[in-house]
Amino acid sequence: MPLRIIICCCLIAGLVGCTTVPPAQTAQTAQTSRPVNSYLRQGDDEFQKKNYEEAIAQWKRVKESGTVSPDISAMADLRIADAQFESQKYLEASASYESFRKFHPNNMKAPYAMFRLALCYYNQMTGIDTDQTPVNNAVAMFENFLKQYPQSDYTADARVKLAECVDRQAQHEIYIGRYYYRTGKYGSSVKRLEECIARYPQAVSLDSAFVYLEKAYLKNGEKDKAREAYNRLLFRFPTSKLLKEAAENLDKKSGLLPW
């Protein structure tokens, strides 16, 4: 057989061999996508049944497949965080939401992830006589959320919860001020309560701060400042149920009229 014919045959065979690769790759990709979609659906089903651990396991399989698109990967990340949140594993959920924000900052669900991160801290809040770290973290996160996403669907709820958290901070300071008052440390009580009033001027619980401030001033022998505390209470909270008690404190305990 002439040499040129042999060479042509080899070239044709090589071209045919090359054309067979893409179909094989396409089939492999389709085969891989099927279990990924299956994991997603199974995870969704388990989540609806409140089987959160199994849902997380299915969504982790999506991540572990290593062949998913960035959008699918982000979806799995967020669903894992939601399952942790719904199972009240707020420490794990907060880490997952934070990770989502770090690796998918431009995702359309970024505002949702940040709001849920704030809720993780919010849902860990306990009494006013306990560690206030979750409260402080919630305040910081809600404030940052409102700065970054002032027009979000979650903005109204964030504002309400932020106000609640700030009031909780004020209640904690009032609790300490009352403790100082009960233990006879009237100067320390005055200092703490005045700082609370200055720091949280919009807190709805401040009327009790003014009442204990009045009491502490009276115990400290500072009658003029006690009367001033009453007047400040009257100005800020004219409908407070504590006004009667504050007026009686001036009248009975000091012989002063509240006006």
Image (cartoon, rainbow, N blue to C red):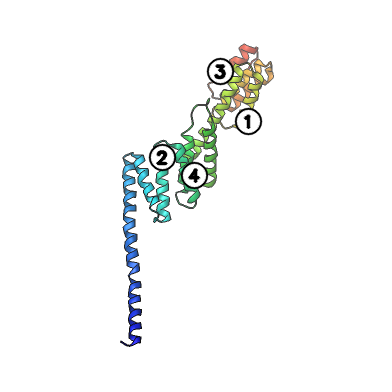
Ranked by sequence position, the earlier of labels 2 and 4 is 2
Q: Residues within 10 Å of mark 3 (few under 14, many from 20)?
A: few
**Disc nearest the viewer among 3 and 1:** 1
Query: In the rendered view of the protein, which quadrant contains the N terminus?
Result: bottom left
Q: Nearer the viewer, residue 20 or 226?
A: 20
- Per the model, the C-alpha gap separating discs 3 and 2 is 48 Å
Labelled pair 3, 1 in contact (Cβ < 8 Å): no
- Say which residue appears at 52% left-offset and 27% top-offset: 130
Residue 154 shows in this picture: no
In this rendering, which labeled residue sits more in front, label 2 or label 1?
2
**Amino acid at dot 1:** Ala
Give the quadrant of the C terminus. top right
State the image coordinates of residue 63 (x, y, percent, origin top left): 40, 50
Residue 248: x and y in percent read 59, 14
Does 42 sit above or below residue 90? Answer: below
Per the model, the C-alpha gap separating discs 4 and 3 is 49 Å
